[in-house]
Image: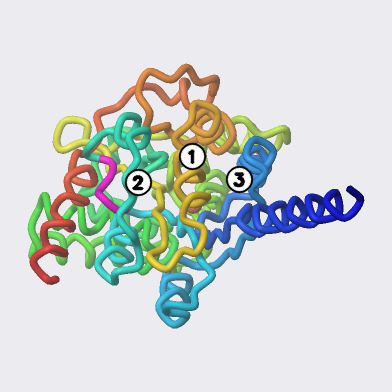
Amino acid sequence: MKKQLLLIALALSTAFSATAQEKVLNLYSARHYQTDEKLYENFTRQTGIKINRIDGKEDELMERIRNEGANSPADVFITVDAARLATADALGLFAPVKSKLLEARIPAHLHTDTWFAFSTRARVIIYNRSALKAEDVPTYESLADPKLKGKLCSRSGAHPYNLSLVSSLIAHDGEAKTEEWARGVVANFARAPKGGDTDQIKSVAAGECGVAVSNTYYLARLIRSDKVEDRRLMERVGIVWPNQAGHGTHINISGGGMVKTSKNQASAVKFLEYLASDEAQRYFADGNNEWPVVAGLNTNNPALDAMGKFKADTFADQRPGEERRRGAKAA
Ligand code: FE
């Protein structure tokens, strides 16, 4: 009897340790928002799956997964920018994911067979209210206007946020016109490009620059800040939804997919599905000031509401499909 109990106990402990080993998710993340911590904690609390996170820059993480090859511990790769996701896909880093839940919740234009968008953000024009008016900078194209000479501040043009914006302009205005535009933009620089979006917002507020571009969530973060100086700073900054009379404001996405060599595929799919859950979607909106991709969700973000409704450029939406077709041809 005692021996039998011991055997049962042994069998149980083996079974448990096997389960414990499976309950891990190795997440490679190029999302650089501290507020995401809570999102991951909630997932672990709900599922018991522990997340081992490796943070890095988009390209570095993709290179790392490639170099690790079949031995890569990565289960899920999440990043920002549709072009980056398409590149990861073209490199063969993702495995197809079949999930009725993901297909039902994420609009068709915001996912492929291998990767899924979980939030969107817009790239808008900001200006110093004492130096300029909204009418001075109604479009991205207007940023090359010689009357803005010495007034424009920017982060590096090589950053994915700016590369993505430029590729949307090429799609709308053509390569030659966009090249000319880029020269005009450089001629208008108040200083050499540096810093991130928040640095541009602060420089615009301080009057060092008259105009810059920024992703919307950085603006909302300052509008909602606990610090009074952040909110004051935003009073000096005007926000323009660019190109409302034309092709609309440039939007981009944040998203991810399951890594091809994942050893924890069930956990990986569970995590992707979690990111499309009401809770996680609300978190993207209320926590990180992004727009959810799931339709009809009630969110509670006064800063996003205050920025109002706008016409979004559909180019970013179409690109995943285009890239997918191109990828299929290349394969
Ligand atoms: Fe960002």
Secondary structure, mark 3, is helix
**Label 2: element kind:** strand
- Verify whether residue 288 appears in magenta: no
Most foreground residue, 241 or 1 = 1
Under mark 2, the amino acid is Phe
Q: Which residue is mark 1?
A: 275
Main SS category, magenta section: loop
Colour pattern: rainbow
Q: Which residue is labeled 2 in the image?
A: 116
Q: Mark 1 or mark 2, which is nearer the start of the sequence?
A: 2
Q: How many marks?
A: 3
Q: Residue at x 29, y 66 (%)?
A: 87
Q: Residue 320: horizontal and vertical position, in percent? A: 22, 51
Asked whether residue 92 appears in the rendered view, the answer is: yes
| Residue occupying image coordinates x 50% and y 31% | 285
Residue range in magenta is 110-114
Picture coordinates of residue 55, whole percent (x, y): 58, 64
Instruction: Classify mark 3: residues with Cα within 10 Å, few (<14), some (14-19) or many (20+).
Output: some
Task: Compare marks 2 and 3 and give the one earlier in the sequence.
Answer: 3
Question: Does the CB distance between marks 2 and 3 fall below 8 Å?
Answer: no
Q: Quadrant of residue 226?
A: top right
In the displayed structure, 69 sits above or below 180; it is: below
**Mark 2 packing: few (<14 Cα in 10 Å), some, or many (20+)?**
many
Residues at marks 1 and 3 touching, judged by CB atoms closer than 8 Å? no
Q: Which mark is residue 36?
A: 3
Disc 3 C-beta below 8 A from ligand 1: no
Distance from the alpha carbon under mark 2 to that under mark 1: 10 Å
The answer to whether 86 appears left or right of 193 in the picture is left
The amino acid marked with disc number 3 is: Asp
Picture coordinates of residue 261, whole percent (x, y): 42, 68
Q: Secondary structure at mark 1?
A: helix
Q: In front: 37, or 5?
A: 5
